[in-house]
Amino acid sequence: MKTSREAPSIPSPSGDTVESPQDGRSWLVSRGLVPETRAQRILALATFVNMIGSGVYMVSAALYFTRVVGLPLAQVALGLGLAAGVGLFAGVPVGHIADRRGPREVYLGLLVIQAIAFTALVFTRSFWLILPALCVAELARSAGGAARGPLVRGVGGTDLTRYRAYLRSVGNLAGSGAAIAAGFAIQSDSRSAYLALIIANAVSFVLSALIVMALPTLPPVPAPAKASRWQVLRDRGYVAVTAIDAVMSIHHQVLLFALPLWILGSTDAPRWLVGMAALLNTALVVLLQVKASKGVDDSASASKAMRRSGVAFLVGMAAIAAAAGAPVWLATIVIIIGILVHTVGELWHTAGSLELRFSLAPAHAQGQYMGLFGLGSGVANVVAPSILALMCITLGVPGWLLLGAVFVVVGLITPPVVRWAERTRPFAEQTA
């Protein structure tokens, strides 16, 4: 059996020991720049590669289908919408399979399916052939999130909270890099550039699958004899927490959907704020998510983080709303303040949401529980544009404040709902 060799240490002037300068990995681990274990690093690398491909696809999909394939915009919107709707319901059943068959193998298979589905898009030109490929890809993507949940739990180690936050920072860093790369390709506005982006997405799933193959197999956690096949659907407390998180998750579209329309249509703020909002938000998430998640390691602290996030969303949205009718300099200042405060709320919400979805789920059923939580956030993404268009754009300032107040109320009711979920959850002794 191999034993790991400790890096040489050098005495410091104070009498403590410091790591050898040659031990670059130890230095990176101590600074929190890379995870501690090999399995954690492998999954983080797979996440980074996966999110690069996904980020490229998100930016270029509509342009590829309209400018290269030649589909009408209405068909593209219909196809993407139908695929997203179909994918919503894959998480729970596939998550259950991952719980019973092992998350590594199921997640690996779903990555391969996504690679095949997105490759098919390169060779199809008919809407009726593209639609099933999109649906299969979206089904695999949604199901992949459910299978990945128990995989993250299995390799996360003793500080699972920190590792989950690290993965989110890695994902945001990859997504922002992908958006920049896609922007350069789109600038050329050529058929070859759009094709390259779609192919890059397909290749990213192949590479992610090859990386995941290096992970050890994780045996399923034995289920109690009385466990139900679809236990999560009977866990009313977890369903309630999922619904609360879904409402709060609408905030993810505020800076991406509502803010650009608000800046251009209702304020005198400069247009460059639209691009800066996404850049600033992503940078703060990459830099601060791990720090914001520190101490959010049980359901009580997660509930408090959710409660704080609701207040932050109200303050941030009120600042953004205040830009209406303000002079350029003041509108710019209050919008930047709003972006910063809203991002703080996002950091708190993410920390609380990640902890609740894991800590309230039994260890033997992490996959199907992650699937239900993913369904909640998926529904939020589908309905968010319509809600934000009505509240923030149509109603204007009152709508911004009203929606912010909704976030506050949701945050305030989270702690008692979570306590009820804890009291009523089945197999509490086996929770992760």
Image (cartoon, rainbow, N blue to C red):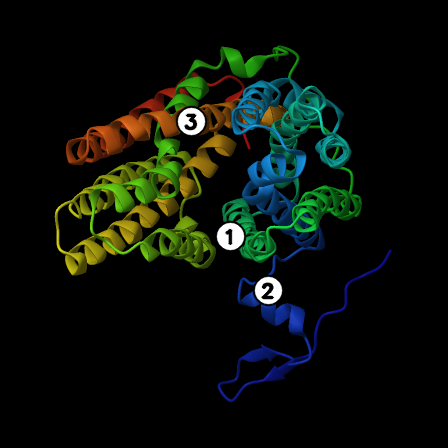
Disc number placed over residue 169 in the picture, else none = 1
Disc number placed over residue 29 in the picture, else none = 2
Task: Write down the residue under mark 3.
Answer: 380
Mark 2: amino acid: Val
Mark 3: amino acid: Ala
Q: Residues within 10 Å of mark 3 (few under 14, many from 20)?
A: many
Between label 2 and label 3, give the one nearer the viewer: 3
Give the quarter of the image for residue 333: bottom left
Label whose residue precedes the other's in the sequence (1 or 3): 1
Vertical arrangement, residue 336 with respect to residue 370, above or below: below
Mark 1: amino acid: Ser
Q: Residues within 10 Å of mark 1 (few under 14, many from 20)?
A: many
Vertical arrangement, residue 313 with respect to residue 229, above or below: below
Give the quarter of the image for residue 94: top right
Q: Residues within 10 Å of mark 2 (few under 14, many from 20)?
A: few
> Disc 2 to disc 3, how far (Cα)?
36 Å
Q: Nearer the viewer, residue 253 or 129?
A: 129
- Tell whether 25 sits left or right of 317: right
Q: Are marks 2 and 3 in contact (CB under 8 Å)?
A: no
Considering the image in quadrants, where does the N terminus appear? bottom right
